[in-house]
Image (cartoon, grey):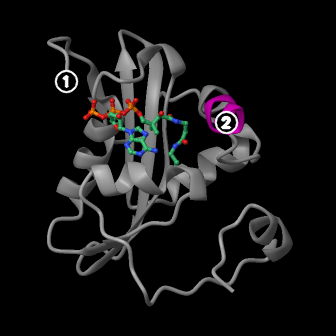
Amino acid sequence: MENVSYKIQDNCDGIDFAEVSDLLHFYGLSDLDKDTQKRVFENSYVTIFIKDEDKLIGVGRALSDGICQGAIYNIAVRDEYRGKGIGKLIVDQILSRLSGCNVVLYTHPKHLGLYEHWGFRRMHTSYAKFPQEEHYEQEGFFED
Ligand SMILES: CC(C)(COP(=O)(O)OP(=O)(O)OC[C@H]1O[C@@H](n2cnc3c(N)ncnc32)[C@H](O)[C@@H]1OP(=O)(O)O)[C@@H](O)C(=O)NCCC(=O)NCCS
């Protein structure tokens, strides 16, 4: 992490969800509109927003019961801020708020190495049931 201080916000107060929606859409992580994205983040157990001054430069969130289980979603950092440790910062901030929980995530096949780089391990035993199964099938998410 560079010696620059970015602001870490862990609630949705004052967040421009049009920016969040654009960021996630741009990287192909979500197509939800800003109002729906707002509900998604507000309904999440952990939300992390990283700001440079007032500019939103990174996001991430997790679903959890707050006791024993958690799942990470929507980790994204603006292009011009990549490679400075911000993605890892977001994940670490989420993990610290899920202390004691089993934490799982799934990602696009092209990012598998990233999460291994950040200390996650591949599982043999995970299953998924998605409404848009064909899309995920085409993108190479499933083993069989
Ligand atoms: C993935 C993403 C969040 C990383 O953000 P970032 O701020 O650049 O990440 P960091 O600087 O904290 O860490 C990057 C590190 O991961 C490594 N890395 C990146 N992609 C990798 C991959 N596919 N496999 C292995 N390592 C990878 C980098 O080499 C770098 O290593 P280093 O810290 O040892 O130098 C960012 O590129 C992004 O927003 N991508 C678009 C959205 C996305 O794909 N999100 C992830 C899928 S949910």
Task: Say which quadrant the C terminus sits in.
Answer: bottom right
Residue 24 counted in the magenta span: yes
Q: Quadrant of residue 132?
A: bottom right
Q: Which of 42 and 62 is in front in this view?
A: 62
Query: Is most of the magenta stretch helix, strand or loop?
Result: helix
Q: Observer-nearest residue: 5 or 26?
A: 26
Which numbered disc, 1 or 2, marks the residue closer to the eye? 1
Q: Can residue 12 be seen in this view?
A: no
Q: Identify which amino acid the numbered label 2 is placed on.
A: Ser
State yes or no: Cβ of the residue under disc 1 lies below 8 Å from any atom of ligand 1: yes
Give the residue at x 69% y 29%. 22
The numbered disc on residue 1 is 1
The image shows residue 95 at horizontal and vertical percentages of: 24, 57
Place of residue 84 in the rendered image (x, y in percent of width and height, measured from the top left): 30, 21
Image: magenta residue range: 21-27
Mark 1 burial class by Cα count in 10 Å: few <14, some 14-19, many 20+: few
Residue 134 lies in what quarter of the image?
bottom right
Work out which quarter of the rendered image holds the N terminus and state it: top left
Left or right: residue 63 compared with residue 70: right
24 w.r.t. 8: above or below: below
**Residue 119 against residue 103 in the figure, above or below:** above
Among numbered discs 1 and 2, the one appearing first in the sequence? 1
